[in-house]
Amino acid sequence: MKHSILVLIGSILLMNCTRPERTLDLQGHRGARGLFPENSLLGFEKALEIPEVSTLELDLCVTADHELVISHEPWFNETICTLKDSAHEGPSFSLYKMTYDSIKAFDCGSKGHPDFPEQQNAIQSKPLLKDLFAMIADKGLRWPNFNIEIKSNRKGDNKYHPGPQNFAAAVAKTLYELNEAYPEADVFNKVCIQSFDPRALREVRKTALPVKLSLITEKTADPAKEMNALGFPVDIYSPSYELVTPELISWCHFRQIAVIPWTINDVSEMQKLVDMGVDGIISDYPNKFKALVY
């Protein structure tokens, strides 16, 4: 009897002293933008070679022939793309007015980015979302999570992208197709749709697409006000990292909403946020994740 009591006490003490394993969603921003051309197949492939990376973060735009192309801007950014002529430069031109055959002829990898001197440059075209899935399957890479941003806003409707209803429908259609083509990718459990545009999130929700939703915010962080305006709580709240506070994290966690800030490239800032209690980190330098302690 005495032995049993001692065993019981020992078990309780061991349980109290054992910390539950903590996991973080560590995301490569636009693949690994600090190391390779952004939103490129090369960058995504290299990001997946980093063991700590659990998620590929990327951006979606729409072409004239209704394809989902991976691009941060809905035009060619002259900083990183080699342009055929000035007509394709900057916001005056729109990918939404081009077919993908025309878009893929442009090089958006060999110029490099002046803000990322460590980038290893290579000729890269803007890939389609389905090209990314095909590359992962063809090369036998591990299937990650995908944090996919719908790039839309009210001013850009029907100029740089379709309206939110049609954009959401295109995303849903493509994800259903990818889920059927690549069952091993476990699409509906591994995809999150994020956006600054609450209209896009509302429309994705209406499609009943069984994926997580994330609201991104930049200038202010008031999750109660923002989700009240959105009309429902999201799965993930993604503020600019400077806006994160312990109070914000507590508010979200009480409601079972994960907090994953962007975009943090300094290890000390990453660690500060990890210690504060965030659920993930989005970084241009996913190679730095190995330095985190949690």
Image (cartoon, grey):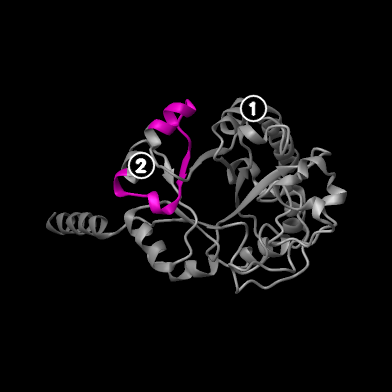
Q: Is residue 229 magenta?
A: yes
Residue 266 in the image, given as x and y percentages of width and height: 44, 67
Callout 1: SS: loop
| Residue to which mark 1 is pinned | 207
Q: Residue at x 62, y 64 (%)?
A: 47
Q: Quadrant of residue 212?
A: top right
Residue 187 in the image, given as x and y percentages of width and height: 65, 44
Residue 151 in the image, given as x and y percentages of width and height: 63, 42
Amino acid marked by disc 2: His
Residue 85 shown left or right of residue 257 in the figure: right
Name the foreground residue: 155 vs 86. Answer: 86
| Residue at the far left in the pictured view | 2
Q: Residue at x 45, y 56 (%)?
A: 24
Q: Which mark is residue 253?
A: 2
Is disc 2 surrounded by few (<14), some (14 to 19) or many (20+) residues within 10 Å?
Answer: some
Amino acid marked by disc 1: Thr
> Which region is colored magenta?
225-247
Q: Residue at x 43, y 44 (%)?
A: 258
Residue 244 shown left or right of residue 116 in the figure: left
Residue 227 shown left or right of residue 94 in the figure: left
Name the foreground residue: 190 vs 92. Answer: 92
